[in-house]
Image (cartoon, rainbow, N blue to C red):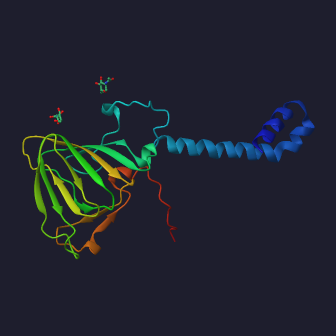
Amino acid sequence: MTNRARQQLAGSRNARASLTMSEPLLSFFFFFSFLLHSAISDASQCSVKGLPLVRNISELPQDNYGREGLSHITVAGSVLHGMNEVEVWLQTFSPGSRTPIHRHSCEEVFVVLKGSGTLYLASNSHDKYPGKPQEFSIFPNSTFQIPVNDAHQVWNTNEDEDLQVLVVISRPPVKVFIYNDWFMPHTAAKLKFPYYWDEKCLQLPQKDEL
Ligand SMILES: *[C@@H]1O[C@H](CO)[C@@H](O)[C@H](O)[C@H]1NC(C)=O
Ligand SMILES: *[C@@H]1O[C@H](CO)[C@@H](O)[C@H](O)[C@H]1NC(C)=O
């Protein structure tokens, strides 16, 4: 169809008759190009197509995504980079800042690059709500995994230093359930999807507004 449209386009320069014949095709061709072009412009903000394979982390988009004390970089992700199996974040928590209490049905690995803090983890033993969490000190060059669906919170409890972590999650984009406190029922935890840093670029099917 496109080739035919192109032939018609070329032909139209020479022959008036063929121009007449090709008008519907030409209109279609231009309309289609327009659609294609708009789709590409819309996507360019939310795609790293054209970026080098090796990227300087200092030059990747970095934001707090509305969360005070957080600096988040999606190093390689589902929404921006088309990752299917894993996603990697680099996050810095200023003194006192923390993640919400939350759970997700994916695996998660942390590597503490700098600073220290506390991991709060409620093992999945209570069936109604997370319950009082266990506390673990985290320190430079420490690593830990969060069991799938266990409620947890990472908190920079060090008053003097930023906490910097490299985070790997499976099954992106992450679907997070947020708790107000450790005694909120699992069923009342609120789904936050897309998550803060996926919000801008993750296209969800829009519901009809009536
Ligand atoms: C990476 O980016 C930072 C900030 O722009 C810059 O200072 C640094 O020189 C860059 N590193 C390389 C190897 O280009
Ligand atoms: C972290 O531990 C590894 C293994 O002992 C070591 O090679 C590396 O230098 C450590 N890194 C830091 C920042 O301490």
* Residue at x 37% of width, y 60% of height: 193
* Residue 85, image x, y percentages: 41, 50
Q: Quadrant of ligand 1?
A: top left
In this picture, residue 78 sits left or right of residue 177: right
In this picture, residue 126 sits left or right of residue 158: right
Which quadrant is the N terminus positioned in?
Answer: top right
* Residue at x 24% of width, y 51% of height: 67
* Residue 71, image x, y percentages: 25, 43
* Residue 115, image x, y percentages: 13, 41
Q: In this view, does 173 lie above or below 126?
A: above
* Residue at x 35% of width, y 36% of height: 60
Instruction: Identify the residue at the far left of this view.
Output: 159
* Residue 68, image x, y percentages: 21, 49
In this picture, residue 128 sits left or right of residue 43: left
Depth check: give the residue in front, 86 or 28.
86
Instruction: Identify the residue at the far right of this view.
Output: 17
